[in-house]
Amino acid sequence: MTPLFIAASEFERLLSVWSADRPVYVPVTRAGYRHWLLYSPDSPVRAELDGIRAVEPLKSFYFRVRERVATYPGTPDSLDAEPGFVIVGAKQCDLRSLFCLDQTFATSDIPDPFWVTRREKALVVGADCSDVASTCFCTLLGMEPHPQDCFDLSLAAVSGGFVVEVGSEKGEKALRVQGLELQTATDAQLAERDKKRELTRAAVEEQNQKYKTSRSFTELVTSGFGSAAWTPYVGRCREDAACLAICPTCHCFVLYDQRGDGSNERIRVWDFCYLRGYTRCGGGHSARATGNDRFKNKYVKKFQFYPAKFDVVACTGCGRCIEACLAKIDMRQVLHDLEESRNA
Amino acid sequence: MLNPYAPIEARILNVLDENSAIKTLVLQPAEPLVFQPGQFVMVGMPGVGESPFGVSSSCFDREKFEVSVQIQPHGKNTTALHNAKPGQTALVRGPFGNAYPMDYFKGREVYVVGGGVGMAPMRSVLLALLHEADTYKRIILRYGARNPELRMYKDMCLAFESDPRIDIAYTVDVADSSWHHNVGVVTTIMKPEDIYDIPSAVAVGCGPPIMLRFMVPLLLKMGFKPEHMYFSMEKNMSCGMGMCGHCRIGTYYVCKDGPVFTYDQIRDFPDAWT
């Protein structure tokens, strides 16, 4: 579909219309960081669509930190009642994460109804990155810092408004608002968008030059499992799992049951493979009993398991793990060291 | 859309003492549970939780099924299952995972090796083999336990001693005066002469990781092909559907791609053998 142009004021009107019947979440800066906040036309919350991704990964809107997934005996909670939500301003590193998690939660022969229903109902509006954080590395994974996957609509800021691309039928429907003024984007507007995109992409590429490897990350992790390059990082890792909690593609969880009033509940809560008890079995043995096994596990899951199983790397280069790490471990450096150790 | 986290109810028909640590629960689910040997189910008590168990009964019984539960220190669910009484309601999800390729086994010698509570899924395999014993070339069982008291399915094992359809050898690590079979770990009763036609024979094993680590080189030495060595793997599992991430080894989810794997599928993954 031909790219469109929407003026900034018209876009504000669009947000206001969308927010009439469902929550709209937009990125807003608080204390120097971008967070997802609930938009309301009557509040001072205004969408900030420039810059980089928000602190919180998108997964938490669909796959909640803690959620009741079954009640027994009794009728399960109805997902039909959920109105759906709108995400405005998602960056490519988060959009790709939705694709990755679709592989786990939606394409399985037993799909997860919570993920699938929320994915169906949600409207996702992507936005170009206009900046780069020192931790960003999407280009190392062959991605671009503008919307490529899983968006219903995408926005690229140009003079006076946004170039809009439609990514799905849902996105097309969301633009059917009475009196909404949309024009076909002009060549000048598209050129402005492309120039900005190129500048951002070049900035991401330039800062990641030093981390570039000649072999793919998948090859490095698969062939480097026994490498000594892991050792210094294993010693530094605090196993606090901050990197996993904040990762947009990590999806581990554990189920537990609790007694309620007259019935029982089954609760699903996020879990993390860096925690010591994660693989412990009834008999006491553990598949990954040492810190060494656990540290490598994240890399195996993202760069070996996911490509083998789903043909996609489960890392989107968002850099949240680098930012969150107490031990200042940089995934790019770990992977780079794996290559260096091969060449040594 | 079906909620795969919601359990179905199952009436506890009987609770059988196997030994001081293991009880077998006979369960009648509210909806028929159609499974194949090697598959597992999640079983729990209301409000307590659930745990994965390999089904230990015959897949030809569609009315009820059995799981053998080893009580675990601090294990809330295994304790609750051990304390359960006939007539109470348990909760079930499943069956999950793949199964042993019983059709492929037809016409071949099937070498079944069980260790400790790993005998549970092996029992389901043995019952399926014996159900159509004529279609398999030979059925061989090698079963080891820590001591005579800790053996499971004692009546079944005794009956096998006089069953011409199955070649058995039993062992315990530590014997008592009642024991008249071998003493030693299970690999001490696994001999090359157990198998007549090694190129076509299949081995089926389940037991603690330490047993598997010693059994694998022995089976290879006996001449079994890596793709003919089948193991039921045990890993920590929460969902059973390939979502929670816990049971992953290498490029597989044990709950979904397994729990039955051939040796050539998993030999390169270090976390498979711990």
Image (cartoon, coloured by chain):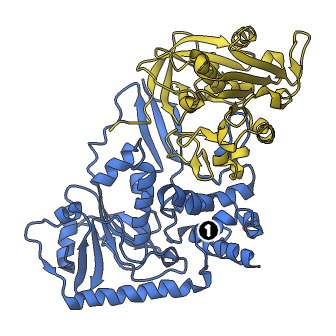
Q: Position of residue A103 (x, y in %)?
A: 43, 54
Q: Position of residue B244 (x, y in %)?
A: 53, 46
Which quadrant of the view contains residue A78?
Answer: top left
Which chain does blue denote in the image? Answer: A
Residue type, label 1 = Glu
With respect to residue B45, does A64 lie above or below? below
- Chain under numbered label 1: A
Pointer 1 local density, CA inside 10 Å: few below 14, some 14–19, many at least 20: few
With respect to residue B265, does B70 lie above or below? above
Which chain does yellow denote in the image? Answer: B
The N terminus of chain B - image quarter:
top left
With respect to residue A249, does B100 lie above or below? above
The C terminus of chain B - image quarter:
top right
Instruction: Decide which of A33, A195 is in the foreground and name it.
Output: A195
A124 left or right of B220 in image: left
Residue where numbered disc 1 is placed: A219
Q: Position of residue B52 (x, y in %)?
A: 58, 32
Asked if one can make out residue A223 in the rendered structure from this viewpoint, the answer is: yes
For image coordinates 82% across by 32% down, the residue present is B192
For image coordinates 74% across by 62% down, the residue present is A226
For image coordinates 58% across by 30% down, the residue present is B38
Badge 1 marks a residue whose secondary structure is: helix
Instruction: Decide which of B168, B55 is in the foreground and name it.
Output: B168
